[in-house]
Image: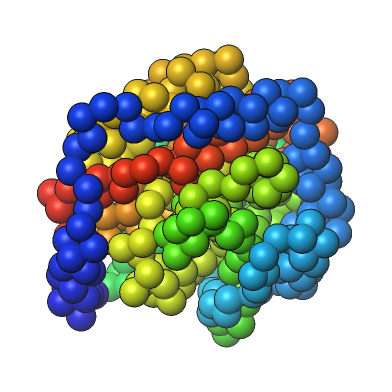
C-alpha cells in the first residue's frame, strides 16, 4: 500500500487544478433540476420494475459466491440485462476474484448428551481434517473476554456466544460482527483448535448465518463455523451445568483466484459527460441462499433508478454510471478493482451512492463529503421526505463496494434503510425472493433516482472528503 501515497497526492493535485468549487452562497440546485428530481421520485412511487430485476437475477444465477458457476451467470445476466435496457457503454470490466468453496459441513455434541448441531462454515474458513475436530467448549462473550482469559482456550474449541441486538440501523450488526471477522485468529493466538460462534443474526430459526472471516496471516488458521441460534442456545444451556464436548467437520476451502468482472453501464450526461455519479451494488452473494436481499435488492434498485433517469425528458448534466460489483462478500475485489482501474478518473467522480441494505424502507440520506456539501444535502433531503428519508446523517460511509473511493475523496452517500428485520435473513438459506418488499423497493428507487439526478445536475462540484477523514495508507 505504500506505493499508493504518491498516487493519492497526485489525485489531490488534479482535483485542485480542476478548480473544485468553493461553498455555494445561494441554492445549490436550479429549479428545473429540483422539478426533474421530484418528477422521478413521483414516477418511482407510482410503481417500478426493481423487484422484477431482482427476480430475474436470482432465478437465473441463484447463489453466486465469486468465481462460482452461479456468479458467472450473474455477470452474464448483468451485461445482457443492461444492454437490453438500452444503457450506453455497457461493459464487463475484468477483475480477479478470490474463490472459496463449501462442500459439506456437520457437527454434534459429543457429551454430555449427544445430538446433532446445525452449523455452517464461515466464509474463508479452512477445512477440518476429514474426521473433524473434537474438543471441549470454552465459552466467551466477546473478543475482550477472550483476551483476558486466553490461557483457558488452549486445546479447546472457543465458542463466541455474543448476542446481536435488533436495531433499525447498523448498530446491532456492527457491534456483534467482530467475533465473526476476528474470532478465529483471536482464538488461534491462545492455542485453540477451532471456533464456533453464535450466528450474527436476529432470528430464532434453525438456519445458521455465514459471512466472511479474516485470518491474521501470522497465526495458525483454525476452522470456524456459526451455530444456528437455537443450537447456540443449547450449547449455552449445557455449558451452565458442566463441560461440553463437541465435534464438527468442515469440507471447504480457498481455490485458485478466478477471472470475473464488474458490470458497468451508463446514462451519458447532457453537458458534462466526463463527470460521474456512480450508483453501486454487488452481484455476488453468499452461497446458502439466493442473495435476494443481499444484494439482489441493491442491484434492482440501482438499475431501476438509472433506467428511470434515462427515460426522463431531460438528462442530467453529468453521467450516471451503474456499477454492479463482482465481489463484495469475501474480499471486496470488485471495489478494489474499480478504484484501481479508474484511478485517473476518480477526481471526476462527483458522488457515489451504494444500495446494499436489503429491502427495508428508506429512513435518511447518509453522507460523507466536505462540509460545504451540506448545502446540497439540505436541498435534496426535502425531496426525499415523501419516501420517508427526509433527514440526513453526516457520518455516513457509503457502502463496502464504494468505500474504496474514500481514499480519493469521492463524496459518498447511502440511503439508510430500516434494518429491523434484515438480519433475520442476512447470509442465510432464507435470503430468497419472498423477502423482497416491492413497495419499499419503489421507495428506495425513488430516493436513489432523485438523489442521483440532483447530484448529476448540480451546478457545483461537491466538496470532497477532507484529507483527515480519508483512510491513511500504511
Ligand atoms: Zn451485501
**Residue at position x 77%, y 46% in the image:** 54
Residue 470 locus on image (x, y percent): 21, 53
Front position in the image: 367 or 172: 367
Q: Quadrant of the N terminus?
A: bottom left
Residue 112 locus on image (x, y percent): 59, 38
- Look at the picture and state if 189 lies above or below 109: below
Q: Is residue 74 visible?
A: no
Q: How is the image coloured?
A: rainbow
Residue 378 locus on image (x, y percent): 35, 23
**Residue at position x 18%, y 73% in the image:** 10
Front position in the image: 235 or 367: 367
**Residue at position x 67%, y 23% in the image:** 42
**Residue at position x 39%, y 36% in the image:** 174
Q: Is residue 320 visible?
A: yes
Q: Quadrant of residue 395?
A: top left
- Look at the picture and state if 278 lies above or below 239: below
Question: Total number of numbered labels?
Answer: 0
Residue 462 locus on image (x, y percent): 30, 44
Q: Is residue 360 left or right of residue 244?
A: right
Amino acid at each position: 500500500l505504500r506505493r499508493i501515497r504518491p498516487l493519492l497526492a497526485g489525485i489531490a493535485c488534479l482535483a485542485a487544478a480542476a478548480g473544485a468549487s468553493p461553498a455555494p452562497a445561494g441554492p445549490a440546485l436550479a429549479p428545473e433540476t429540483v422539478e426533474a428530481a421530484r418528477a422521478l421520485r413521483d414516477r418511482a412511487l407510482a410503481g417500478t420494475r426493481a423487484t422484477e430485476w431482482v427476480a430475474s437475477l436470482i432465478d437465473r444465477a441463484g447463489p453466486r459466491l465469486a468465481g462460482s458457476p452461479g456468479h458467472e451467470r450473474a455477470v452474464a445476466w448483468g451485461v445482457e440485462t443492461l444492454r437490453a435496457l438500452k444503457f450506453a457503454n455497457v461493459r464487463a470490466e475484468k477483475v480477479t476474484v478470490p474463490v472459496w468453496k463449501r462442500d459439506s459441513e456437520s457437527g454434534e455434541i459429543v457429551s454430555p448428551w449427544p445430538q446433532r448441531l446445525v452449523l455452517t462454515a464461515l466464509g474463508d474458513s479452512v477445512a477440518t481434517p476429514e474426521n473433524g475436530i473434537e474438543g471441549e467448549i470454552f465459552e466467551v462473550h466477546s473478543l475482550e473476554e477472550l483476551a483476558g482469559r486466553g490461557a483457558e482456550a488452549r486445546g479447546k474449541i472457543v465458542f463466541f456466544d455474543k448476542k446481536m441486538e435488533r436495531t433499525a440501523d447498523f448498530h446491532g450488526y456492527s457491534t456483534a460482527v467482530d467475533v465473526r471477522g476476528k474470532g478465529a485468529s483471536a482464538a488461534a493466538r491462545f492455542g485453540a483448535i477451532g471456533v464456533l460462534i453464535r450466528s450474527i443474526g436476529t432470528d430464532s430459526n434453525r438456519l445458521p448465518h455465514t459471512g466472511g472471516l479474516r485470518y491474521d496471516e501470522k497465526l495458525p488458521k483454525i476452522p470456524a463455523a456459526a451455530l444456528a441460534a437455537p443450537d447456540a442456545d443449547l450449547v449455552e444451556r449445557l455449558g451452565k451445568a458442566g463441560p461440553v464436548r463437541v465435534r464438527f467437520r468442515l469440507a471447504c476451502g480457498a481455490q485458485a483466484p478466478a477471472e470475473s468482472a464488474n458490470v458497468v453501464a451508463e446514462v451519458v450526461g447532457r453537458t458534462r459527460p466526463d463527470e460521474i455519479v456512480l450508483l453501486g451494488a454487488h452481484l455476488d452473494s453468499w452461497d446458502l441462499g439466493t442473495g435476494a436481499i443481499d444484494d439482489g435488492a441493491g442491484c434492482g434498485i440501482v438499475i431501476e433508478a438509472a433506467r428511470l433517469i434515462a427515460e426522463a425528458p431531460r438528462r442530467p448534466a453529468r453521467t450516471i454510471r451503474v456499477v454492479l460489483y463482482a465481489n463484495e462478500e469475501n474480499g471486496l475485489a470488485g471495489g478494489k478493482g474499480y478504484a484501481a482501474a479508474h484511478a485517473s478518473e476518480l477526481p471526476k467522480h462527483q458522488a457515489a451512492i451504494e444500495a446494499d441494505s436489503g429491502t427495508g424502507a428508506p429512513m435518511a440520506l447518509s453522507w460523507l463529503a466536505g462540509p460545504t456539501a451540506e448545502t446540497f444535502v439540505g436541498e435534496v433531503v426535502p425531496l426525499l421526505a415523501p419516501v420517508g428519508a427526509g433527514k440526513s446523517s453526516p457520518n455516513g460511509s457509503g457502502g463496502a463496494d464504494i468505500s474504496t473511493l474514500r481514499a480519493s475523496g469521492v463524496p459518498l452517500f447511502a440511503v439508510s434503510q430500516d434494518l429491523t428485520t434484515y438480519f433475520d435473513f442476512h447470509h442465510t438459506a432464507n435470503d430468497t425472493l419472498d423477502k423482497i418488499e416491492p413497495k419499499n423497493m419503489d421507495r428506495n428507487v425513488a430516493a436513489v433516482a432523485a438523489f442521483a439526478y440532483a447530484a448529476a445536475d448540480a451546478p457545483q462540484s461537491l466538496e470532497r472528503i477532507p484529507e483527515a477523514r480519508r483512510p491513511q495508507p500504511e
